[in-house]
Image: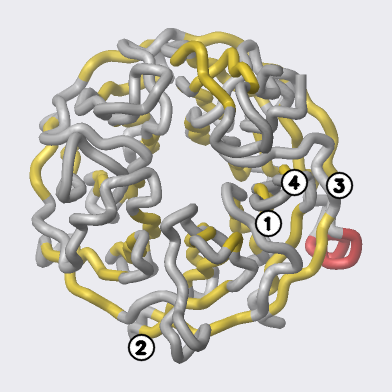
Amino acid sequence: MRSSAISGMFLLSSAIALAQSGGTFTVTGAMTTPRVWHTATLLNNGKVLIAGGESDFNLIGPGQYGFLAPQSVLATAELYDPVSGTFARTGDMTAPRYCHTATLLPDGRVLIAGGYSTPQAGVPTNTAEIYDPSTGSFAATGNMISGHGCQQANLLFDGRVLIVGGSGAGNPAPNAELYDPAGGTFASAGAYASDTSGFNTCQGGVSTVLSDGKVLIVLESASAEIFDPAAGSFTATANVGSPQVFPPYGIDFNDGLPTATLLLNGKVLLAGGGDDSGIHANAELYDASTGAFTATGAMTTGRDGQTATLLPDGTVLMAGGYLYGPGDVTLASTELYDPARDAFTPSGNMTTPRGGGQTATLLTDGRVLIAGSRNSSVA
């Protein structure tokens, strides 16, 4: 079996049609190469840069998750043109990588950082590079202080990029770093407020930039903290899924992180993920004004490895993911979160189940491009 190279398009015809019918998915052009754990970045010209990832999977055991053996790591990249609905090759990266990050910089270039360069994830790389859309080529930039894999990258209001979470070469997890595009260099962002000795994994952390420019980070243990770029420091905030919200034991994410989506009202929606008890359907809202998490309506199904995309009308599209356990299930279903009603409702099904490693990119016309998958059931 091979991972799917097919891409799906979520068509948002209008806010009313979305709320009533959930929108529709249609197949768009296939990527030039099957990919999973790649990155997808909307460029200023409206095209989408797809970079790296793994390809050529062999199914070596039962189930959908954790049994796909990657045979190659990709250095190739391609561009999706929403006007023609086609993908075309662009220049190759300077190094193969997957589980890396890609961040659109204020000048229109893209920072590619970290990830793994061998099929079996081991020691992540500390290398980074820049994609220039004007030339269609990649060039090396300064190295990170530490190797980071499965990390998160956040563009700060001052143009720097904060690298947080993920895994490194040993315990504790590597400290956060800041990339300065002006100098092309990385510097330490300081130590986390939480003990990260147990979080050196691909479930290391999930993050999002808040309306005030600070960054919310949720760690695998469900502890949360705030990075203040002005102060250059991390401070603890309320835990996610505390016993007061999800009694009696709370919640954690040692088997998969939730998604974290900044809503138009300034709150952050955290949804899904997994721990030893299974996949979560729970969702919570973080309010930066109070520094607290509160429960919101649960998803219609538990999801891990899903994508979450803020749509122009303020709703959030949750797409795909998987459920593990006896008879693991890769999901084609989607649902929409409506902040006005604090509720999720089913949306249309994707044309292809996608169980993790896919990307979802909001295009300039309001549609969402969903590309790649780790669905072993798709040839």
Report x, y in % for residue 159: 25, 46
Disc 2 target residue: 290
- Is residue 97 in view? yes
Q: Position of 177 compared to 161: left or right?
A: left
- Distance from label 4 to label 1 (Cα)? 26 Å
Mark 3 or mark 2, earlier in chain: 3
Question: Residue most toward the bottom?
Answer: 244
209, above or below 154, in the image? below
**Element type at mark 4:** loop
Mark 4 or mark 2, earlier in chain: 2
Residue drawn at (79%, 69%) of the image: 345
Disc 4 target residue: 327
Crowding at mark 1 (Cα within 10 Å: few <14, some 14-19, many 20+): many
Mark 3 or mark 1, earlier in chain: 3
Mark 4 or mark 1, earlier in chain: 1
Q: Nearer the viewer, mark 4 or mark 1?
A: 4
Quadrant of the image containing the N terminus = top right
- Closer-to-camera residue (336/374): 374
Residue drawn at (35%, 77%) of the image: 239
**Element type at mark 3:** strand
Residue drawn at (61%, 44%) of the image: 362
Report x, y in % for residue 304: 59, 53
- Distance from label 2 to label 1 (Cα)? 26 Å
Disc 3 target residue: 24
The amino acid sitting under disc 2 is Thr
Mark 2 or mark 1, earlier in chain: 2
Q: Nearer the viewer, mark 3 or mark 4?
A: 4
- Distance from label 3 to label 4 (Cα)? 28 Å
Disc 1 target residue: 317
Report x, y in % for residue 148: 26, 36
The amino acid sitting under disc 4 is Gly
- Distance from label 4 to label 2 (Cα)? 41 Å
